[in-house]
Amino acid sequence: MKELLSAGYSVDDFAKKLDIADDLVGAQTSSGALQKFMHTDKYLQYATYLIFVSKANRKKRHTNIK
């Protein structure tokens, strides 16, 4: 994950890499689609990267405050 972040992969870029960008859009408009999508391995990978990027950004902001 560090390599992807260092290479400049955004969360949206990662969704495209996993080929789930369209699934994410569909899940935003349908709760049934969201529930089904959240039980996939690709969603788990996406959510893990999202959390990783979020933590990295918080850490970056925290170190810039000092």
Image: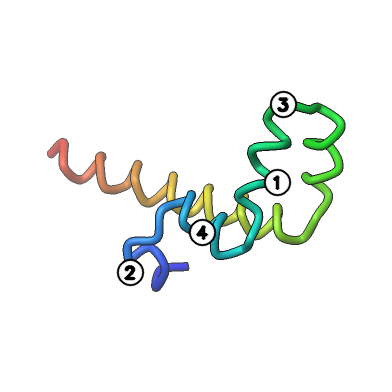
Of the residues shown, which amino acid type is indicated by label 1?
Asp
Residue marked by disc 2: 7
Question: Of the numbered discs in the image, which one, if any, rests on residue 29?
Answer: 3
Rendering quarter of residue 29: top right
Is the Cβ of the residue at disc 3 closer than 8 Å to that at disc 2?
A: no
Residue projecting furthest to the bottom: 3
Of the residues shown, which amino acid type is indicated by label 3?
Thr
Q: Is residue 50 above or below residue 29?
A: below
Residue marked by disc 1: 23
Of the residues shown, which amino acid type is indicated by label 2?
Ala
Q: Earlier in the sequence, mark 4 or mark 3?
A: 4
Q: Earlier in the sequence, mark 4 or mark 1?
A: 4
Q: Mark 3, mark 2: which one is toward the viewer? A: 3
Residue 45 x, y percent position in the rendering:
65, 60
Is the Cβ of the residue at disc 3 closer than 8 Å to that at disc 1?
A: no
Q: Nearer the viewer, residue 16 or 40?
A: 16
Residue marked by disc 4: 14
Question: Of the numbered discs in the image, which one, if any, rests on residue 64?
Answer: none
Residue 51 x, y percent position in the rendering:
53, 48
Residue 4 x, y percent position in the rendering:
42, 68
Q: Is residue 29 above or below residue 33?
A: above
Secondary element at tag 3: helix
Q: Residue at x 38, y 63 (%)?
A: 5
How packed is label 3: few (under 14 Cα within 10 Å), some, or many (20 or more)? few
Q: Residue at x 37, y 51 (%)?
A: 56
Q: Earlier in the sequence, mark 3 or mark 1?
A: 1
Quadrant containing the C terminus in the rendered view: top left
Is the Cβ of the residue at disc 4 closer than 8 Å to that at disc 1?
A: no
How packed is label 1: few (under 14 Cα within 10 Å), some, or many (20 or more)? some
Secondary element at tag 4: helix
Q: Earlier in the sequence, mark 4 or mark 2?
A: 2
